[in-house]
Image: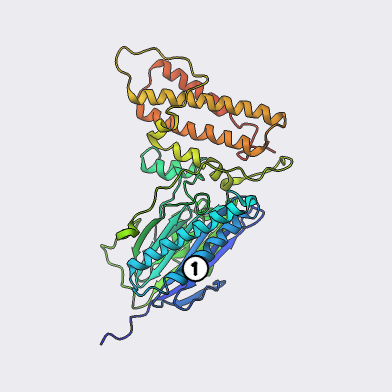
Amino acid sequence: MFGRPKPIKIRVVGRTDQGKTRDHNEDNFLVADLTRKDASPPTAEREYELGERGLLLAVCDGMGGAAAGELASEMATDTIYKQLLQSWLEESEVTGQRFAARLKEAVETANREIHNYAKAHPENRGMGTTATIAGVLGDHLYLAQVGDSRAYLVRGGEAHQITKDQSLMQRLVEAGELTEEEAAHSERRNIILQALGPDPKIKVDLTHQELRRGDLLVLCSDGLSGQVKKEEIAREAATGDLPRATERLVSLANERGGPDNITVVIARFDGDGVRSVAGADEVGHQVYPLIDTEASTDPVPVYRGSKPPVPSKPPPTARWGGRGERLALLGVAVLAIGIVGWQFVRGKPSNTATPALPAASTPADPALVILDRLADSVTNAVRGYGSSEQQFAAHRIDCPRLAEDFGQVDALWVSYNLGKRRAGPLDATRQSRDRTLDASVDSVGRDFDRSGCPRP
């Protein structure tokens, strides 16, 4: 006789805040009991007894300007929940494999819904949202990730990031081009490579984690993770007072400027159905492999950006902030990763070029050939930006157009520097050219912010 499964108790609290600089909140979070079909928000701490069909938690951080970002994040949470009610609750095979597949499917469905809505409503063109989705089934956690909102697991007082940011900086860290500390302080840390909505197809990062008694799951938008260190997140979450922890974490982000919307959801796992911590337990980013046809994800087309609605008169203090910059730079940022800079410039003849380098008597080093092409592209992009500045001054183009040209310079400069590291020591001529390029790129955008509008 099997008897009832051992109980798993999950205490959850969520909080979202506008922050100090945004004029509205584009974040959304969700906590839903899938067994009982209950998605009422836990405004205060709430305890769930985990049912057969599990618990769903989500944080989505919208983007797109005006109310489009807020709409995108709300559509994402609503669609994912409704899709799971339709597909997962009708699933006859209640296993982790099927749950993970349905979770991924729900995120892909949300992407299509947002993408199709934006196509049908041009005023919301470019709308999108990150999605960090956690599903709890038994003593296992399944995560579906798109964008750069995060999930941390706090165990033994230490926070472990169990999602990977789909961002330019994460790629550069993985390539060994930047340290995590350098990436955390980079001006380009807000450039993401995927979001729900901008493209018809996405690649969902599907991972899993086995839970232990006393574990704490923290989901948050980058309005929190960008201002509060993971050690501080662990310290606050581990106090056991979850409402106080969420309040304190939001306060810390606001005390440090609150430059973005701030959202955090904390869940604590207890009960006899969750095993105690053992010394060999592994915590981290662990890919969950799907089987059969569920294992494949179609290639993701490069998102080349879309202009936000053009204001009738460029406001002198207009800002996109981190989120607008992300989508403006998205396409060129993807192409700027690693040595694929060769693909970015291949077949594009230069109208003008940097001073010719002396011809080598021996076959050219491929890394140097790539570097020289990238240098030409950077030079042309800087000149293109200068031309755009003149057109802006003459009222022939708008702020977003200037921002696109700014983004091209920025991304090509990243690609050039990656190529420079791989090319090794430069000869005297290339060193001189490098100094000239550095000065010209540094001059770009001195009088304009990253939305392309004049600095206040």
Where does the image place residue 319, in percent across and percent down from the top left?
65, 44
User: Relative to 3, is 340 above or below?
Assistant: above
Pick the residue in front: 348 or 78: 348
Q: Is residue 266 visible?
A: no
At mark 1, the secondary structure is helix
Pick the residue in front: 365 or 103: 103
Quarter of the image where the C terminus is located:
top right
Q: Residues within 10 Å of mark 1 (few under 14, many from 20)?
A: many
User: Relative to 128, is 384 above or below?
Assistant: above
Residue drawn at 39 percent across, 42 percent down = 173
List the residue tagged with mark 1: 81
Quarter of the image where the N terminus is located:
bottom left
Task: Identify the amino acid type marked 1.
Answer: Tyr
Q: Is residue 62 visible?
A: yes
Pick the residue in front: 1 or 181: 1
Answer with the quarter of the image where residue 396 lies. top right
Residue drawn at 38 percent across, 30 percent down = 421
The mark tally for this picture is 1
Residue drawn at 58 percent across, 37 percent down = 404
Where does the image place residue 49, in percent across and percent down from the top left?
43, 78
Residue furthest to the right: 313
